[in-house]
Image (tube, grey):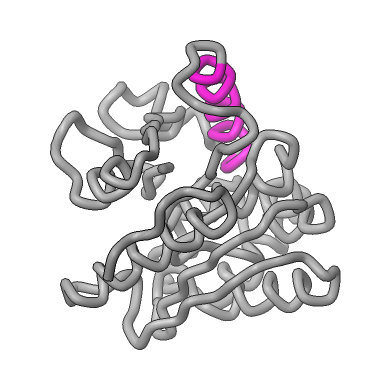
Amino acid sequence: IVHGGPEAHDQDAFSAAVQAWVDHGFAVVLVNYRGSSGYGKAWRDAIVGRPGVTELEDLAKVHDTVVRAGIVDAKRTILSGASWGGYLTLLGLGMQPERWSLGIGVVPIGDYVAAFEDEMEPLKRYDAALFGGTPADVPESYHRSNPLTYIDRVRVPLLVLVGQNDPRCPSRSVDIYQTRLRELGKPFEEYRYDAGHGSLVIAEQIRQIEREIAFAAKHLGTTPPIA
C-alpha cells in the first residue's frame, strides 16, 4: 500500500485499512519512498524533476527485497494506494508491468496534463515546482511521469475508486485514462462515490475497503470479506 502526499510518510501505528488486509491473509508492505517527509530535505526533494519515476525505483527495490525474503509472492503482488499513491499505482502498472499482479488506485491521477488543467490553483503551483514548470513549459517532464504514457503496457486488472467531486485529483483525468483502457481492451473496474478526495463517512469507508478486498479475492483466489 503506497502512501499519498507525496510529502507524507507511513508510521509504525495502527491503521484500520492495513488491519483489514492483514485480517484477510495479506502481507502488507508500506514504503517511505524518496519524496516522503520525515527523512530530511534531501530525501523529500529527491523526486523534483522526476516525480513518480523516482518513487517507483524505490518501490522496485523494496519489492525485490521482500520477494527474496519470502514475505511476498512475486506472482501475487498487488500495487495499491490512494491520492499520490493511486497515481503511483497507475504509473507503476505501466512502467513496471512485470512486477504487479493487480492494481488498486484510490482517487488517483490518470492523465497528469488533464489533472493539472483541472486542479486547484495551489496544486498547480506545487506541480510546477515538482515538475520544473507547467505542461506547456516542460512537456517532456509531464510525458515521462504521466500514467497515460505507458497505458498500452498495462497487463493486469485494475480497480479505480473515484470521488466524483474530487478537487485534488479531478475525475476527468481518470475518465481519460479509463476511456483509453477500454479502447485497448484492458480489464478494469470502477467504483464511484458522491464525495471528494476520500470520504469521512465511516459506512462509505467500509464499503470501499470491502470492494478493494473483494476485488483482490476475485483475482488472486483469496477469501473475500464478509459483509
Of 153 and 218, which appears nearest the observer?
Answer: 218
Q: Position of residue 206 (x, y in %)?
A: 25, 68
Q: Residue at x 61, y 73 (%)?
A: 173
Q: Which residues are magenta?
A: 51-67
Quarter of the C terminus within the rendering: bottom left
Is residue 63 located in the magenta-colored stretch of the structure? yes
Q: Is residue 59 visible?
A: yes
Q: Position of residue 98 (x, y in %)?
A: 74, 36
Find residue 209 and report its image quarter. bottom left
Q: Is residue 70 left or right of residue 133?
A: left
Find residue 201 and report its image quarter. bottom left
Q: Position of residue 8 (x, y in %)?
A: 30, 41
Quarter of the N terminus within the rendering: top left
Q: Residue furthest top?
A: 69
* Secondary structure, magenta segment, majority class: helix
Find residue 75 and report its image quarter. top right
Q: Residue at x 55, y 64 (%)?
A: 159
Q: Position of residue 35 (x, y in %)?
A: 43, 34
Of 184 and 83, which appears nearest the observer?
Answer: 184
Q: Is residue 146 above or below residue 200?
A: above
Of 109 and 227, which appears nearest the observer?
Answer: 227
Is residue 100 located in the magenta-colored stretch of the structure? no
